[in-house]
Structure formats: structure tokens, C-alpha cells
Image: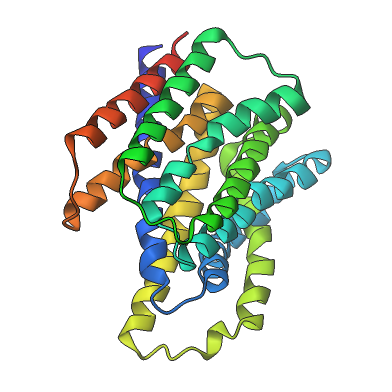
Amino acid sequence: MINSKLINWVLFLTLCLIWGSSFILMKISRAHLTGVQIASLRIFSAGAILIPFGIVHISKIPHTKILPVIATGFTGNLLPAFMYALAIANGLDSSLSAILNSLTPICVVIIGFIFFKNKISGSKLTGIVVGFTGLCLLFFNRNMDFQNSHFALLVLVAAISYGFNVNFVSHFLKGLNPVHIATISLSFMAIPSFIILWQKHFFSLPFNERVVQQSVLASVVLGIAGSTVGTILFYMLIKKAGGLFASLVTYGVPFIAVIWGIIFGEQVTAWQIVCLGIILTGVYLANKQ
């Protein structure tokens, strides 16, 4: 039992680190790539390296489960990648994006209750409320530029998409190997991503220029780490600890964003640290048996 809980928390913290770093990578990528190019390159990079594994693993998936697996590639990777990339590429603050990402656990609960008839205990609901309260306090304490805040709706769509994805995996794919789910779903998503890259003239970019190389590299790393490795670990966490706890990874994302802020010389206040403490308290309460 102790080892199982330790593994769950290791997976949790690793995912926080990976996905918390994704926003800065998108911000680097937007120096010379459009939002559509960033998202397409991210998913294509993730899917392309998994195609050989996807070909092998697809024979291990029951025929009735193939479509749900492909659906998780769309709801858990393709659609959110485009929503976040478009929002950040159009000037939405990356920290604000990370904070809005905290709506994912709320979406998981609401979608699970409405569409999947899930029941939520009082302790888990309290944890979600406490964690979201901490994020709200962190949000209102920051002096953010709201000029492009209407792009926040794109982040909301991504959170809803993640909410459906968590419930899909928990209810329809719970007995399947998470590695198989990730490799097959991302392999399928590589196809539309490549088509979009070609249509958006990505292959005509001046790749000899340094700024282009940096933007492309950031998107490729985002795809391999954030989508490939992150998705596999996320599905493992869903299988081991449940969909609700797995979705609470989004509460740790702003914590990583603060660390990146320190590294890049941004001011981090004591109030922000207090808010992060509240967030982590919500994670604990939501995971409490």
C-alpha cells in the first residue's frame, strides 16, 4: 500500500514538472511559429516516434475499443494542444493559461456526474474547492495583462476536452494497458497533424535561421516530453489512482510555473507561495480516503 501511494505521488510530481514546463516551451515556440504550427508539430513529433509501437500494440486492443482509444487521442492531445497553442500564440499570458488549466478537475467532476453518473464524496469535492480557491487567490493577486483575456475561452475548451478524456479512459479503457492507449492514440493523431503542417507551409520555413531552429526545437521537445511521455504517465496514473486524482495534476502546474518565473528573474511573492500551499492542501484532501 505504501509503495503504491509512493508511486502515485512520483507520477504526480513528474507530470507536474513536465506539463508545468509546457507553457514556457509554447511561449518560446511562438517566436517564429504560429499557434497552428506549434500544436501540429507538437502532436506530429509525439505521434511519429510512436508509430512503430502503435502498429505492434493495436493488435492487442479489442476491436470494440479502437474507436474510444482514437477518441482519447483527440480529446486528450490534439484538441487541447491546438487550444493552448492558439491562446498563447495570440498573447495570452502563459501563467494565466496554467491557472485556467486548473478547471480540468472541475470539468472531470461535472462531466462525470452528467454523462457518466459518477458519485463524488464530500472529501474529494472539498479538496477540489480548496484547490481551486487557492488558484483563484493566486490569479487575482497577479498583475496580469487582460488585453488578450478573451483567448481564455480556448483554454476553457481545452479543460472541458481533458474532462471528457479522463472520463473516457476511466470508464471505457480502464482494463487496457496505458502504454498501448497512448501509443495507438498518438500514432493516429500524427496523420492529421502532418497534413496540417503541410497545409500551413511549415516545411517552407527558413530552417537555417537560429530563431526558427529554437522555435521548432521547443515544439518538438514539447511533443516528445509533454505529449508522448506525459500521456503515458497520465494514463498510468489514471489506472493506478483514479481519474479524479490524476486530473489534480493540473493543480501542480502553477507551482512549476512559479519556479520557471524564478529562473527567468520574475518576482515571486510570499502571497503566491501561500496560494500554492492552499492548492497542495486541496490535492491532499481530494486524495484522502
Residue shown at 41% from the left, 34% from the top: 136
Q: Is residue 47 visible?
A: yes
Q: Is residue 14 visible?
A: no
Is 196 situated left or right of 225 in this image?
A: right
Is 50 situated left or right of 9 in this image?
A: right
Is 17 situated left or right of 235 in this image?
A: left
Q: Position of residue 177 (x, y in %)?
A: 61, 36
Question: Camera-side residue: 154 or 28?
Answer: 154
Residue shown at 33% from the left, 82% from the top: 211
Question: Camera-side residue: 150 or 60?
Answer: 150
Image vertical order of residue 4 relative to residue 77, above or below: above
| Number of marks | 0
Q: Position of residue 206 (x, y in %)?
A: 43, 91
Is 279 situated left or right of 78 in this image?
A: left
Q: Position of residue 266 (x, y in %)?
A: 19, 54
Q: Position of residue 95 (x, y in %)?
A: 37, 50
Residue shown at 75% from the left, 25% from the top: 114
- Residue 220 occupies quadrant: bottom left
- Residue 37 occupies quadrant: bottom right
Residue shown at 45% from the left, 29% from the top: 132
Q: Residue at the far right: name it.
A: 64
Question: Camera-side residue: 210 or 54?
Answer: 210
State the quadrant of the N terminus: top left
Coloration of the structure image: rainbow
